[in-house]
Every structure is written in C-alpha cells, then in structure tokens.
Image (cartoon, rainbow, N blue to C red):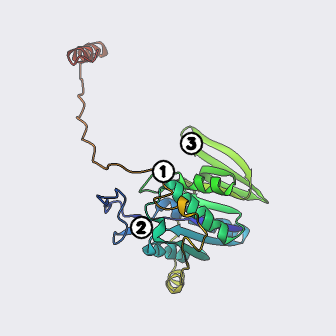
Amino acid sequence: MEIVVCVKQVPDTTEVKIDPVKNTLIREGVPSIVNPFDKIAVEVALQLKEKHGGKVRVISMGPPQAADALKECLAMGADEAVLVSDRAFGGADTLATAYALSTAIEKMGPVDLILCGKQAIDGDTAQVGPGIAENLGIPQITYAAKIEITGDTLKVDREHEDGYEVMETKLPAMVTVVKSIAEPRFPTVKGTMKANRTQIPVWTAADINADEKRIGMPGSPTQVRRIFTPKQRVQGELIQEDSAQKAVAVLMQKLSDAKII
C-alpha cells in the first residue's frame, strides 16, 4: 500500500509574527513545530503500513526549514520524504497550496491513500486536504476517527458533533484525521540518527511542472486586507434574585432601559 501523508511545519503558537506589509505569517527564523494533527496522520499511516505493508511517504510545502518537520516524521518511521519549496510558492492560500501539493503527489506516482491532519493550527481552515482530493479527482472523507481497509475498500468512522457516520469508498482516496484516532509515537534514537543523515529532496515549481498562474500569490484569490486584535468584550452581568420570576423582571427592565426591547 502506497500512503502519502501531507505535513505542515507551523509556527509555535506562542511565537506567531505577522508581516505588516504582506499580512502573512513570518515563518523564517520563527520557532516551529510539526502541526500536531499531521503527526497524528503520520501515526495512522505507520499503523496501516504495519498492518497491510507498503510504504509511507511524507510531503510538505514550505521554506527550507520545513525539512526539519519532515525529518521528525522520518524519525517516527516514515520511509521517504519530499519538500516542495520555491519562492514562487510564497504567499499561497489554501487553494494554491492544495494545487501545488496535488501536483507534487502526482509526480510521486500511484498512491493508494493520502492522509492529512484535520486542519493546521495556524490557519484552522481544514481546506487543503479536501482541495488536494478535488485536484486529483479522488474521493475524500474528513474527520476520520477510525480507518479500516479491506482490499480496495476504505471504511471510515467519521466524527461529527452528534456522533459518528460510517462511510465507505474505494481507493485511492484522501482522508483527514482527528485527534482521537491515534496517539503519535515518539521517534526512536535509531530513527532520529537515520533521519539526520537523510538528504531530503527539494522539488521546485519547475520540478513539479506547476502552472505559475496557480501557485503563490498569483494563484491565491484569498487576500488578507487587515489583521487586528478584536476589542475585548464587556463582561456580562449575573442577575441573582430569590426567584426566576423576579430575575426575569429585573432582566426585562434592564433590557428596556438599554432600549434593546
């Protein structure tokens, strides 16, 4: 089974900085971590490999320092890694990112399953995984809490706010996973030493034959116009009375005085 896991190196949430001109995240020189949901996806991929055999490859799009995130995945047990990196990808929104990653995945060759974390903690859009599936023309199932594979059939327990949906589709497919599906393993010493010796290949826009109009800023219809900190909301008032009837009367009077009713 050929499994590809898309991972993202995200800024440490306590160290996020914004470019005041471009209104984009400053990633160079900022302490970063592997997106936690993507590490879970790597763990799921490794478990599926242990059960069904095959290969786990990880891919990321980002600046050169994103290679560190890929090496962490290799240390966990992934077989191969590819970094998609080019200044032409800079400023990409989710649409352009999904296009670039899907094009790179096509270059990798036949793939049975693509796994992604449910979302990245810096953008929280949950759009890249589904975007990859759309570009590749394959089925997608999001928010997977359990995955079973029998032959070429994929069965997923999909988490939602009211419980779970059981869904089936044929491979190849793309699946995003939630936190409850697995606990990421720790990298081994042997795995870490091997990962540190590994030279991760870097693919540019030319290497993946990407359409320059669909990558980076030119391929990103989403533009951030302004970033600001919202004003802190005024704390509400707790009405305490001897009975519910009196509390309602006090509330109605306050709403009337404020000319809300």
Q: Are marks 3 and 1 in contact (CB under 8 Å)?
A: no
The mark lying in front, picked from 3 and 2, is: 2
* Residue 119 x/y as whole percent: 50, 54
* Residue 214 x/y as whole percent: 55, 59
Q: Quadrant of the C terminus?
A: top left
* Residue 172 x/y as whole percent: 72, 59
Q: Locate residue 259 relative to residue 197 in the image: left or right.
A: left
Q: Indicate the amino acid at tag 2.
A: Ile
* Marker disc for residue 13: none
> If you read the primary sequence from the N terminus, does the residue marked by circle 3 or circle 2 appear first?
2
As drawn, the residue found furthest toward the left would be 257
Q: Quadrant of the N terminus?
A: bottom right
* Marker disc for residue 33: 2
Residue 94 appears in the rendering: yes
Label 3 element class: strand
Q: Locate residue 108 relative to residue 152 in the image: left or right.
A: left
> If you read the primary sequence from the N terminus, does the residue marked by circle 1 or circle 2 appear first?
2
* Residue that label 3 marks: 160
The mark lying in front, picked from 3 and 1, is: 1
Note whether 20 is above or below 243 in the view shown: below
Residue at (21, 19) in percent of width and height: 258
The mark lying in front, picked from 1 and 2, is: 1
Q: Locate residue 189 relative to residue 167 in the image: left or right.
A: left
Q: Indicate the amino acid at tag 3.
A: His
Of 217 and 65, which appears nearest the observer?
217
Of 6 and 153, which appears nearest the observer?
6
* Residue that label 1 marks: 221
> If you read the primary sequence from the N terminus, does the residue marked by circle 3 or circle 1 appear first?
3
Label 2 element class: strand
Residue at (50, 59) in percent of width and height: 37
Q: Quadrant of residue 33?
A: bottom left
